[in-house]
Image (spheres, rainbow, N blue to C red):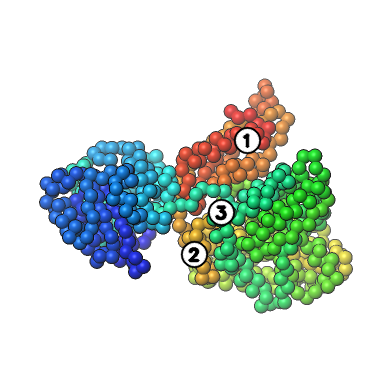
Amino acid sequence: MQPDPLLGEDTAEKPLNILLVGEGNFSFSAALCDASHGEYRITTTCYDDEDRILRQPFAWGNVQQLRSRGALVHFGVDATSLTDYEWSSAAPYDRVIFNFPHCGRKAGVKKNRELLAKFFQSCADVLSQKGDIHVALCQGQGGTPADHPVREWHNSWQVTAMAAKAGFILSAVHPFGASEYNGYQCTGYKSQEKSFHVSGSLNHVFTRSLPLDNLIPLDAIARLTEPSPSTITEGDCDISTERNKNFLKKDPCHPTNLLNEELLAFFERRMIIKRLEDTFPLVYENGQSQSSPWCSVMEANLYHVPAKTGETASQGSHNLHEMCSHEQDNLGNRYGARDGYQGQNSSFSYLRPSLTHCIDPLIKDPLFPSSSLHVLSGPVFKRCLVSQCTMPVFLETLLVLSYQKGNVEAERQVVMDTIESFVASRLTSVRDGTESLVIKELGNQDGKNIVCFRKNISYGGHQTMHLSSTACDDQAIGQIMNVAPGQLVGDFGLLLVTFNIDLLAMRLLDLTDWRLLWTADDRFAQQYKTRRLAAFQHFSLYPPHYVHDVSFWVEEGSAFDELEFHCIVRRVSKGTVTKISLQDRFENLTTGKTSLCYRITYQSCDRALSYQAAAEMQMGLRDELQRCLNVTLR
């Protein structure tokens, strides 16, 4: 935590319009006014009426001092009903300050939570769009990990959850520096003119959150896998709504694009590179490429794109053409991909799970093989279980290197050395060399390593090696595949290298959640507008999480599709679920039914998520599970 930045703030652009509520003796307001040297426009208020303040010489002296310096002072102001006062509508406030809110006397945590919730709701109507709210709380009251010691959540004021009800997120936490405000005397102990202990107190800074909308990639998946694509209009297909367009236009500075460019620059220093445009389809067909070992993906991980009922697969593919072009354009705005869908005939279609599905046209080119390293980047789709490290859509980069018989080890070593140099360089640049790097072969892993190579599987004449991220368990941030001479037409072999650029960016930039890579919040983009990669600075701290259970019966003889269950949860929750765990399973021997109980954790990494919003999603999930899966809710 950094010191409280309230004093000495740069207000060169315009004076901050500051509102203080719940003042006791106005000593904090007076100290802030003195320190601002006229750079703040201060409006300060208290709950007590003017007659009571008149009877307190110290407080009344502060009032006189404030008025002499141009500050506005109001009495009898309820901080939970700020819009009730005419003066509050004069201009939006850049900052609202509430130091040590309390319902008075022996009010418990529940009443004080209600006070906070109503205060935040009231602030939403008087705060400027880019404004912030400062709430100082005594040690342990907030209930966040910033407190030392941390109070149990149920025994705290749950400040982040109360703020989320009004659409605010916690963006900073600072020690409350009472000694920095000359003349400040805290007061209000048991509603009296007595001071109280402020040691260990924290100043919590809240900012507005964007609305809780669906994630862009989840929108894309929903539209591309729509069962009746012919009913979708062009306007429906365009997922780049105005708010998303603003985010996508910043794509040249998006960290995944910056990281990808730096990766390719490293390879370009060692070999000739030929960059390919992603004119390949987002949708492929059953059997089109799956027979190739390098395209092998479990069918369960494929997003199916079904044809409309009563429509042939060929017609369905044709109807998908325009829609897929729109979606590829939107995803491509971030990734630098291009549209270009070509319908095929098949029993069913699916979203491409890897760019390795795109190499058939390349190797059939009369000019192939060549000495160049062919490079292709674009979005790919994989059905996956819910977690903060596994993403259903991500940027993949494919490197295709041809070699003559007998040269595979030399070529592979060049690739591995280049990857090693790149990651080591990025660690030095992004993290100032604070994390060690050791890259080893054949499975020797060290918990401190960010990547390592390990032999994984083999198909006849080629091997696959993974670059495993120790932070995300078994997730691979890339793989190297060897297609030996003889497996293709001609006497050449191929080294195929794929990178999950999103996951690599997470590891290098200290991103703990893949959803942040798709946030529409401008505070993410602003961190990389200079095109310099650096460790990510979170703008939503300690977001509240909510836990709900769902139990249901699976009919006798029915196979429960857990992956589909996770996909439904992700879709219904708009991507706000971070964890799903099986809590209980038992079989009723009489009916043959199986009971499953899952625990679902809701938490947003960049937007305000309230308990009520999570509860509504949970209710919607129950309805959707009955509709989509052959289960009976308990």
Asked if residue 366 lies left or right of residue 84, the reply is: right
Query: Which is nearer the N-term, disc 1 or disc 3?
Result: 3
- Specify the label residue 185 is tagged with: none
The answer to whether one can see residue 580 in this image is yes
What residue is shown with label 3?
515
Toward the top, the furthest residue is 590
Asked if residue 503 lies left or right of residue 312, the reply is: left
> Percent from the top left, x then y, of residue 50?
17, 46
Report the amino acid beneath label 1.
Answer: Leu
Report the amino acid beneath label 2.
Answer: Gln
What residue is shown with label 2?
526
> Percent from the top left, x then y, of residue 520?
53, 56
Q: Is residue 88 above or below residue 559?
A: below
To which quarter of the image does residue 404 belong? bottom right
Query: Which is nearer the N-term, disc 2 or disc 3?
Result: 3
Quarter of the image with the C terminus is: top right
Query: Which is nearer the N-term, disc 1 or disc 2?
Result: 2
Nearest to the observer: residue 233 or residue 66: 233
SS at mark 2 in the image: helix
Quarter of the image with the N terminus is: bottom left
> Percent from the top left, x then y, of residue 252?
59, 67
What residue is shown with label 1?
625
Report the amino acid beneath label 3.
Answer: Arg
Near mark 2 (Cα within 10 A), the count class, few <14, some 14-19 or many ≥20, is: few
